[in-house]
């Protein structure tokens, strides 16, 4: 089988591999190389060593500002989304009417694209802020909390579904045993339910973490970084550096490499955590 | 005790009902604003349309004309359907090859596919759009190849995970009966892969249909998909038409809601399976 199949390389592997090389692998290597050069089009690249990496931080404060904004946003979103999603999952695994309909409604926003989401919330938030005589571009604070609300609206339903799957996998006897031993509902929650959904918690934490950290479309549509570039997150700052002004393409690519390394660290942390848990089991 | 429980349940139900209303409110507000004259939207976004502000379907006609919505819908549909079909077909074939043909080469390729999953789009944004230009892939058909390439990481990973759990004996039996790799794959393996194929299709549909930056950078000035067309309303030219924007947001949401209502079971199942594996 092995050997016959091997001859079918052009049919089975080549289409996906060729597309992968063109769309991902070659651009990836080229991007890595270009981050050490100065260029406006790819063909006029000049080697400049680490200068782009230095300039990413030194030419202005945009990148550090975006990094700080992104980190704060990610921390707040991960906590709020997960706490609220878990609370909803608890409510919806109880024996009440209409749980299916509620699930359907809470999950729906997750399917709407980031650009559309951004404009929906821009209307709502500006409508509320209008009462105070300002709009969302007035201060980065408004943009920040606007993005947090948007992110919660979009992600809660998704995470809720994963938590529900986790809660439903808890053996019923465990809960019954706790009740017979005289545990209060709060004690059952704290000592049985929460530890038993630990793997769902890990999945949800990392899903919200990477999604928040890499956020772009919502950021572009909701504030586009306003005021100035104060509410721009990392992905938007990289985009602005590339396409905002001539001569900064190399700096943009260096920022993109740094961004990639940060995302990779998060991914490896997740891999490490899930692996070590699997060993415990 | 039992009475108290019942009371709590009723309270919870009422709370969830209110919360669902709050979840739907943003879309509902956009919906009724889409029937107001464009100058009455920013000035009083929460007011219902009345005799003075109601403008019928004018915003819809305006918006559809401005961003050529139905053309955008066509491009989005074409690109999404054929990209997803290509991804399901070619990455399942690739995954089967990678799992069944054991060598350092297939091993390395597998890890390369997996590696691509953690690379954010911004890393390859500029160089990818240049490559697309050079290779003349800057059209809806070319974009299908690009999505196949960029989406293959997750899809190969998910298919491989499933294929590893398929017992080899089933395939060997087919080989003994005289069927070649092509027959074995399409008659035996691919039908077994169906649950994973649905998950892969759902996840990629949600990604490609809503994707903004990739189509904007690669084909955005000639062919606008729906997200690119909506963002185009924001445009460079000063004041934007809020009425048209509201109407287009609604038109952009309708296909997603319809898709969701028809395939809800698969979407939710696919999303859970994808989360656990991704």
Image (cartoon, rainbow, N blue to C red):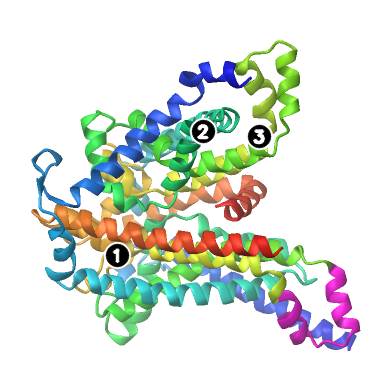
The image position of residue B265, as x and y in percent, is 67, 49
Residue B141 is covered by the magenta coloring = no
Q: Chain of mark 2?
A: B
Circle 3 residues within 10 Å: few <14, some 14–19, many ≥20: some
Is mark 1 in CB contact (under 8 Å) with mark 3?
no
Is A116 in front, or is A203? A203
Q: Report the chain holding disc 3.
A: B
Residue denoted by label 3 = B193
State the separation of the CA atoms marked 1 and 2.
31 Å
Residue at the image point whose x is 76% and y is 20% from the top: B173
Q: Give the structural element (helix, strand or loop) at label 3.
A: loop
Please name the residue that numbered disc 2 is placed on: B91
Mark 1 is surrounded, within 10 Å at the Cα level, by few (under 14), some (14 to 19) or many (20 or more) other residues, namely many
Q: CA distance from mark 2 to mark 3?
A: 12 Å
Q: Say if the magenta span includes residue A174.
A: yes
Identify the residue under disc 1.
Answer: A234
In the image, residue B248 sits, relative to residue B239, either above or below, namely above
């Amino acid at each position: 089988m092995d050997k016959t199949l091997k001859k079918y390389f052009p049919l089975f592997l080549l289409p996906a591999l060729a597309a992968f090389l063109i769309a991902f692998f070659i651009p990836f290597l080229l991007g890595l190389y270009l981050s050490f050069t100065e260029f406006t089009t790819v063909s006029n690249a000049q080697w400049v060593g680490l200068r782009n990496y230095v300039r990413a931080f030194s030419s202005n404060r945009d990148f550090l500002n975006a990094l700080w904004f992104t980190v704060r946003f990610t921390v707040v979103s991960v906590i709020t989304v997960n706490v609220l999603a878990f609370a909803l999952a608890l409510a919806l695994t109880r024996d009440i009417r209409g749980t299916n309909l509620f699930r359907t409604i809470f999950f729906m926003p997750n399917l709407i694209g980031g650009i559309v989401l951004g404009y929906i919330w821009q209307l709502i938030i500006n409508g509320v802020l209008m009462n105070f005589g300002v709009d969302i571009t007035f201060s980065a604070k408004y943009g920040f909390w606007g993005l947090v609300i948007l992110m919660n609206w979009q992600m809660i339903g998704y995470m809720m579904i994963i938590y529900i799957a986790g809660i439903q996998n808890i053996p019923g006897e465990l809960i019954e045993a706790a009740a017979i031993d005289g545990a209060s509902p709060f004690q059952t929650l704290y000592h049985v339910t929460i530890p038993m959904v630990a793997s769902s918690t890990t999945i949800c934490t990392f899903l919200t973490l990477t999604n928040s950290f890499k956020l772009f479309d919502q950021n572009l549509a909701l504030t586009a970084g306003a005021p100035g570039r104060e509410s721009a997150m990392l992905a938007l700052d990289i985009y602005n550096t590339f396409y905002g002004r001539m001569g900064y393409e190399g700096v943009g690519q260096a920022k993109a490499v740094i961004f990639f390394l940060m995302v990779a660290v998060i991914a490896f942390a997740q891999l490490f955590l899930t692996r070590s848990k699997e060993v415990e089991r | 005790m039992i009475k108290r429980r019942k009371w709590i349940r009723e309270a919870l139900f009422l709370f969830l009902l209110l919360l669902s209303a709050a979840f739907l409110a943003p879309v509902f507000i956009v919906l009724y604003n889409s029937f107001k004259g464009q100058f009455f939207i920013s000035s009083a976004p929460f007011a219902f349309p009345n005799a003075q502000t109601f403008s019928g379907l004018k915003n819809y006609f305006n918006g559809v004309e401005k961003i050529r919505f139905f053309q955008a819908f066509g491009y989005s549909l074409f690109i999404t359907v054929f990209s997803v079909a290509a991804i399901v077909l070619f990455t399942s074939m690739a995954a089967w090859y990678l799992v069944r043909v054991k060598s350092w080469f297939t091993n390395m390729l597998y890890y390369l596919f997996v590696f691509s999953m953690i690379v954010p789009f911004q890393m390859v944004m500029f160089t990818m759009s240049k490559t697309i230009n050079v290779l003349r892939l800057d059209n809806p058909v070319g974009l299908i190849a690009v999505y196949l390439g960029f989406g293959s990481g997750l899809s190969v990973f998910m298919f491989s995970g499933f294929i590893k759990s398929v017992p080899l004996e089933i395939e060997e039996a087919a080989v003994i009966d005289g069927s070649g790799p092509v027959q074995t794959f399409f008659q035996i393996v691919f039908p077994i892969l169906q649950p994973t194929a649905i998950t892969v299709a759902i996840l990629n549909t949600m990604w490609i249909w809503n994707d903004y930056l990739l189509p904007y950078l690669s084909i955005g000035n000639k062919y606008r998909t729906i997200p690119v067309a909506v963002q185009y309303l924001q445009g460079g030219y000063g004041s934007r038409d809020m009425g048209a924007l509201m109407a287009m947001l609604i038109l952009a949401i309708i296909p997603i809601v319809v898709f969701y209502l028809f395939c809800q079971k698969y979407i939710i199942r696919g999303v859970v399976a994808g989360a656990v594996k991704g």
